[in-house]
Amino acid sequence: MTEELQNFEIYAGDTNNILITVTNLETGEVKDLTGSDIEWVLYDPNLDETLITKIVGSGITILPSGIMLIELDPEDTLDILPANWYVHEAEVTDTGGVISTVTTGYVKVKRSKA
């Protein structure tokens, strides 16, 4: 099952670390992500355009206790139009080949004045 409406705001051009804990929503148990393939995307639903893609080894690190760390560098968001809501989604393919969309939501990109 998918954790939906996982919404957050970021400032364009900032470094951001997003931590997502993956659990089995039916049992509440933390999912072991060791060896899993994970893809996280940020896309513009109006243009049907993917703006950022992160995968394990290239922006995603698997941590203990079912946690994935998604690292956004300043250049990832610098050219994204601020003041818009975008959609994010993370998909996990575990070592058994089971594919699960584990989280979705909206991201508001804000303009930095500094």
Image: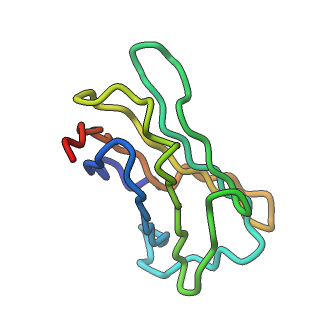
Q: Residue furthest front?
A: 114
In this picture, residue 8 sits left or right of residue 21: left
x then y, percent, for residue 42? 48, 38
The one of 47 and 98 positioned closer to us in this rendering: 47
Q: Residue furthest left?
A: 113
x then y, percent, for residue 43? 48, 30
In the rendered view, tell whether residue 49 sits above or below residue 38: above
Q: Quadrant of residue 52?
A: top right
Please tell me how many numbered marks the rendered image carries.
Answer: 0
What residue is at 80 percent from the left and 68 percent from the top?
95
What residue is at 50 percent from the left and 54 percent from the top?
72
The one of 46 and 79 positioned closer to us in this rendering: 79
In this picture, residue 99 sits left or right of residue 105: right
The one of 24 and 13 positioned closer to us in this rendering: 13
In the rendered view, tell whether residue 50 sits above or below residue 46: below
In the rendered view, tell whether residue 111 sits above or below residue 102: above
The one of 104 and 97 positioned closer to us in this rendering: 104
x then y, percent, for residue 73? 51, 53
Q: Quadrant of residue 98?
A: bottom right
Q: Residue furthest top?
A: 47
Coloration mode: rainbow
What residue is at 27 percent from the left and 27 percent from the top?
84
x then y, percent, for residue 62? 63, 74
In the rendered view, tell whether residue 27 sits above or below residue 102: below
